[in-house]
Amino acid sequence: MTTYEPVIGLEIHAELLTKSKMFCGCSAAYSEAPAPNTLICPVCIGLPGAMPVVNKKAVEQAILVGLALNCTINPMNQFARKNYFYPDLPKGYQISQYDLPVASDGWLEIAEDSGEGSLRVRIRRAHLEEDTAKLMHQDKSALVDFNRAGVPLLEVVSEPDMHSTEAALAYATMVRSILRYLGVNSGDMEKGALRFEANISVRPVGSQEFRTRTEIKNLNSFRALMRASAYEIQRQTRLYESGCEVVQETLGWDDVRGVTVSQRSKEEAHDYRYFPEPDLPPLEISRRWVEETRDQLPELPEAKSQRFVSAFGLTVKEAKRLTSEKALADYFEKAISLSRSPAKIINNWITGEFLRYVNEQGLDLDHLPVPPEHLAGLVDLVTGKTINENSAKVVLKEMFETGQTPEAIVEAENLAQVSDESYLEQVVAQILKDNPQEVASYLGGKETVFQWMMGQAARLTKGKADPQVARQLLLQALEKARNK
Amino acid sequence: MELHNLSIREAHELLSKKQVSSAELTAAALKHIHQTDALIHAFVTVSDELALEQARLADERLRSREGVTLLTGIPFAVKDCISTKGVCTTCSSKILENYIPQYNATVMDRLAEAGAVLVGKHNMDEFGMGSSCENSAFFSTHNPWDLERVPGGSSGGSAASVAASMGAFALGEDTGGSIRMPASFCNVTGLKPTYGRVSRYGLIALVSSFDSIGPMTRDAYDCAAVLQVIAGKDPHDATSLLAPVPDYIKGLEKPIKGLRLGIPKEYFQSGIESGVEDSIREAIRKFEELGMEIREISLPHTKYGLPVYYLILFAEASANLARFDGVRFGLSVTEGAENVIDMFLQTRREGFGPEVKRRIMLGAYVLSAGYYDAYYLKAQRVRTLLRRDFEAAFEQCDALVAPTCPTTAFKLGEKTDNPLTMYLSDIYVVSTNPAGVPALSVPCGFSNGMPVGMQLIGKHLSEDMLLRIGHAYQSVTDWHLKRPVVAK
């Protein structure tokens, strides 16, 4: 039986983080608008006679992304009108770019599914356009909020170079990460700041052909991207397996039912009648502008990850985890610089207990109550054996809740570790004395009871016992009992 | 002389000497409009109250002598495709019948800053689509020289209004002759500036890459005075030109002797009315007397001017008119609509007139997949040839002279049945817009009692020279001073 492999290309729509909109002076921060239709002007609601003017900052951000994605920045740019009717499109056309986009012919390396190898995904183009208004449907009517209309969007289009949903996810994650590193996109998919469209076809493994593809629109999360792609791959594979053909069409994703739904067939496809936007002269991007923008490029996730491996002795996996978010990587580096402890241990704390808490509480990495110096202090208290790990977890939680330094919390709560042997000997003796049955069953070969006894030691010392010392003393006492 | 008959220059002199106030001038203009426009139908809106208020402010300025310009206190009106804050702006279309803009076109802001007094808005062919003013959704404007005849179009209301002294000047808009052609039909001086010389912000677009706002006045001097105020870079219009604005009034007095005047032979071939040709030839002799050097030149691609113009017009206009969907402003026909697309269709069906619909359909067609290359792209390529024709011509001469129209004003209804014959009346004026060059239409005689206009075409940003040539001509002729007697 033929095995099929998917062929996936992604379009990523990213709202740029400019102050003002793409073609007018209105604020682009529509999600902070006090009320619908408050961030609008004649230009972005398409009043007759109003004219667009290009937001230079948006072009600059597009250049940055183009450079980060190893693209050629085109010296001659042209905006175009994409014509279609919809109530969220105030002018009856969207100003976009067609044959002369800001950036083209780039690539991005992503980790292969297996982990070690890497896959090069080619980027066809990245172009600027304007976002549409938001429709709010009521039962028999709809209201339009134009606050979002005209917000700059960058559309990054990949070649169909991905052959698994994991590769698509890795690519999408990497693009999001790069956009966040560049500070040009919030990455907030819940608010729609980042949206995906997947072009999917399948073909027999080993074949180089491109079969009929379908396009899934408006995927608003990684989860939706993965689920919709997986569903569509399976649907197409089954069609071929049962001797049917795939029909070229535009699909939507029904997240509740978990199925793709046909929106438009090829015959019904829009003819957008693109033509050059006559209200905007061609936009020249000089070499100098490109070079000046290149100077603003920060260290990108891939380079940072490699550096973390070589400079801090992290594994590739650890380094990639840390560098997936710039804020996290920055936090890590700051903590290391302030700590006496090994980088590995700092990493373990950050990617372990620390991130768990951050994610649980849905905290923003840029605005944490625990600054890196506090975390560095906490890890140093552990490695310096002032407190044990269990206490440290309690302290960390309190650091998040109160914003206090770990030292202050340890002192206030008297959490400093007890490694005083004479005291711990008494504790161990007490445990043996109070639990003769457990001692007997341990001596009878049931060694799991030992962990229970360690728990008793922690209980009696309120968690402050140095676990290594306690363990040693307990073992000694039990051996003594055996030889009695 | 009656107050409403004054040119800008004459009115300014009286205002400066305090022999008349803007309030008096404005009241006289309004009174004349209310008396005369019943016969002409040049106005869609007369803004009496606002005009009197602006006149009062202008008089304060004149009293204090602060910020007084040539236009301070002067009553004027504009073509109804120019957005006027708080004053209905209709494009003579049902779809905008009750549309009141929330903002001013840049030209309106500049004129307000100069202290000019807006008295109303002029009728036009709907969205500028037409050459006779008969495509207005409201009513046809009549030519003040003969009420049976059209004033030309699409700035027909503006030309008729200036000719009949209803306001000292007007702003028209020229996409493919829409200022010059009616200027010629009505014995008015009209300038289509270089594309980008005057901001289009707030001008309801017909063809974004052709549209040019320009003055329609009694003479070249007044044209210079108005252009002075409205020309220049506008941060809201990315296509407006950065080039500095010269002192046009000062430029009028420079000599024209020795300037080379080209006669494009293609503009004197078949179809030209003999009376029109005679007037133009006579004008050329005048220029020779004034010391200009006359030479025949060729604009070999002239015959492609009309198709290039219309193909690009259809394409751009179809997109420019897409925003009229009933959602945010203007007519909205929701009754019986099943869904929003129904509402769009109903609104546009009821709101747009037949010529507008025809052009939208043609535009969607020439841009559609499979036809784009053959029509739109080809037209854009030929447009380059038209531009090169002019560039080559301006290597041999400083300006060109040609008839503005092949005929004088035709009768109302004469061409309404056949859009193609209507399109042909623009044959001499359409090529300049794809090329972006400026052109000035100047009255130069009469044929069978109707005015004849000649156009002077110059290279990019040569408005000062065109105005100078026009002014020199008007200093030795009096065609432009002739006024119609408006009567039933």
Image (cartoon, coloured by chain):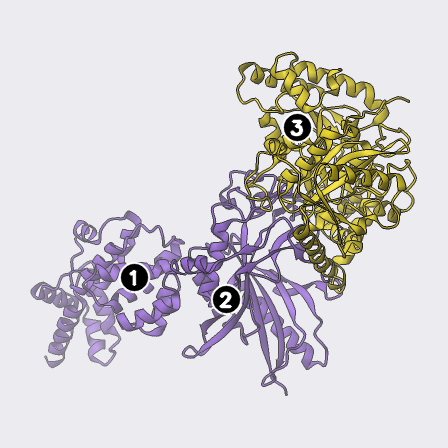
Chain colours: A purple, B yellow
B76 shown above or below B354: above
Residue A129 position in % (x across, y down): 58, 54
B345 shown above or below B103: below
Amino acid beneath label 1: Phe
Q: Nearer the viewer, residue A324 or A434?
A: A324
Q: Which of marks 3 and 2 is in front?
A: 2
Residue B395, label in figure: none
Q: Residue furthest left?
A: A422
Kindly identify the residue that appears in the image at 56 percent across and 58 percent down.
A77
Quarter of the rendering occupied by the N terminus of chain A: bottom right
Distance of mark 1 from mark 3, alpha carbons?
Answer: 59 Å
Residue at which label 3 appears: B86
In the displayed structure image, the side of residue B329 where residue A22 appears, left or right: left
Q: Which of B414 and A64 is in front in this view?
A: B414
Does residue B334 show up? no
Which chain does the numbered disc 1 sit on?
A
Q: Nearer the viewer, residue A424 or A258?
A: A258
Q: What element carries label 3?
A: loop
Residue at which label 2 appears: A72
Number of residues whose C-alpha sits closer than 10 Å to that of mark 2, classed few (under 14), some (14–19) or many (20 or more): some
Q: What element carries label 1?
A: helix
Number of residues whose C-alpha sits closer than 10 Å to that of mark 3, classed few (under 14), some (14–19) or many (20 or more): few
Residue at which label 1 appears: A332
Q: Which of marks 1 and 2 is in front?
A: 2
Which numbered disc flags the more N-terminal residue, 1 or 2? 2
Q: Respond whether the residues carrying marks 1 and 2 are from the same subunit.
A: yes
Residue B87 position in % (x across, y down): 69, 28
Distance of mark 3 from mark 2, alpha carbons?
Answer: 48 Å
Residue A44 position in % (x across, y down): 60, 44
